[in-house]
Amino acid sequence: MAETFARGASKLDPGPAWTVVTDAPLKGMALAREAMRVVAWDENDQINLVDANGQSLGSTRAPGKILYGAVSDDGSLIAFIGEGNRLWILGADLETIDDRQVVMDPTGIAIDPHGRYIAVASKLNLVQFYNRFGKTAGKFETRQHLSLLAFVPTELFIVGVGAFGSISGYELTPRAGGKFDGDLAWTEQLMSGVGSLAVNSDGGMILLGCFNLGVQRFDIRGHNEGAYHLGGSASCVATDFAGRMIAVATQEGELAILSNSGAVRWRTGLPRPITALEVDPLCRFVIYGMATGEIVKLDLFGGGKPGGDTPEVAAITGRPGSGPVRKPDWTSEVVPNEDQAEFSVLAVVDEPTRIGVITSKNRLELYSASGKKVGQAPDIQGVGRILRTAPGWIAAATDRQIMVCDLVKNTAQKVDISMVEITHLAIQPDTYGLAIVQERDRIGRATIAGRWIWKAELNVPVEEVAIGPNGTTAITTENGLLRVYDAGGTMIGEYRAHPVEPLFLSAAPEGAPANVAWVTLARRHQVIRGHDISSRVLWEAPVPWESWSIHVSGPLIVIAAADGRALAFDGAGRVRAQGGRSEGTLDAFAASRSGEALRISKQGVHVICSTLEGRVEWRAFADAPLGPLAVGRTGVAIMIGKSLAWFGDRPAAT
């Protein structure tokens, strides 16, 4: 080790050895310093094991949402704290050793270097020990609950950082039966939050990333030995086993290598801030992870620039040049500023593949799957923006006018009828025409040439409208009714929800039984129903939570909750897929070409396409704010900054 660092004393020449990318945004990372293995877990709770050469050693999905994780230095034990006060203990090859309940409200976790004991901190001002098999192995009380923990490798000592800005040292005393007690040795109050904690082999160097207070240094006796300031907010800190080198990352995106006296030996800027940082025991390399999912090994004597191209960029599965991260197939600037982008409306037509966007000018523009602008409709007057699609067609509407575009002939025509306050619109120009609701209480069927086929006034506001087989029209109302009209406007059926509540409504999906024409969803009373053409209930199925929305795509009906939980049903009411909570906002759902349910979500700077079960199909990260999105079976359209971006259903090269 002395030779290695002496060689670096003359000159550090860091360069990237490899980069791997997790399926979903990176949530956490830890290095088994003796075994030279990296454990990484992502936002989809996928756990990955990578060796020092960047090769995948395996992966598994956690039983639930991961909150905190740790690995022993020898790599023999991996542990995670999960939602619901669960402790998941894994072996060296990610095999499950135990899944058990732990102390209430856990706030942090650490594992001793040899993988014998796990320490779990709790909001109960308690640290509970467990042995490698999940059995309790002692505990001690703390003055405030701890958020960060670290065993000192060569001492019976543990260091903890309080959630309200303090650092404490605890001497560990072995007891009979392989248990431990902990006694407070010292405590010091900090005037800052702490982002990370690192200790060297004997506790002679205890480092805290204290944001605006830089890197604070303590020894095992609790003496503050000073601070290192880099001109930014120090969020991550790591050191080698002997404490001869310090790596520091800031929230501003800088990475620096310091000597143990605090002299800056090398620093660089990175495209994104580091969220996890580790140093190998012999000062040979640094491994860092970014929230976007890249995990980079930086050889300190390897040459090159960390911001440049790496020798290999691979998925965490180890497939060179592949992986879930992709770029848009194309982008096209469609608005002059990001404020207008926020209020754009998008739609995707699958047959033929077209992407429609209508902006504040109320002008519909059309793009092909290759990014070519293939049409532009005249401006329409009024306020509000509605886009509706059908195979071969797209319609744009305001509160007063409707523009219909034939995508096969590449023509556009304005529907020449007088309308006031259009609130609902459904289209099937080839077989039906247009179903239009005005002022929420007047419904009618019209041709695209501008002729009313029938109109009706209602005594209750409309909630939803849908077009069914044989020219039928269905509506749901605020007082819990489902009404069906035949091709001439005569009501042929009515169903009243019990208990009364407005129903979500859709036409039956592809492949539904021949007698199923409509699907309704009672949100508050948590039931989905299939109806025949006259509204009679043919089947119903419970939904285990209050629903937020209903999405029909291809053969699937996807029901989603406000927190992202989702169920996919087929047209016969059978559950085909289900998914847990989502970290994203404004999730959209679609069926792939193969009929699999997909979720597309925005998570910070990410666009993530995954199955309901959580398997990531692809993801992308943007350098501008993410705006409205639309999905179809052929791809995903989304506003990124001022530009319209397209991700086709065949992933592009990374």
Image (spheres, rainbow, N blue to C red):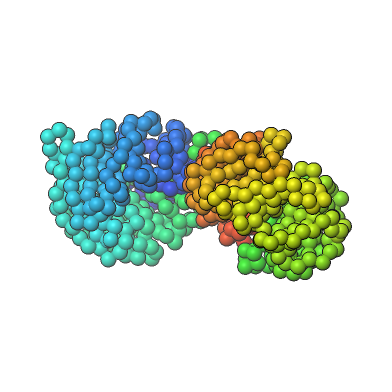
Q: Nearer the viewer, residue 630 or 173?
A: 630
Left or right placement of residue 22 versus residue 121 in this view = right
Point 79% across, 58% down: residue: 455
Q: Quadrant of residue 650?
A: top right
Q: Nearer the viewer, residue 346 or 205?
A: 346
Point 45% across, 56% down: residue: 273
Question: How many numbered discs, if any?
Answer: 0
In the picture, which quadrant includes the N terminus? Answer: top left
Residue 508 is situated, as x and y percent measured from the top left of the image, at: 68, 42
Q: Quadrant of residue 3?
A: top left
Q: Quadrant of residue 592?
A: top right
Residue 281 is situated, as x and y percent measured from the top left of the image, at: 31, 42
Point 14% across, 49% down: residue: 183
Is residue 637 visible to us here? Answer: no
Point 42% across, 52% down: residue: 275
Q: Nearer the viewer, residue 478 or 66?
A: 478
In the picture, which quadrant includes the C terminus? Answer: top right
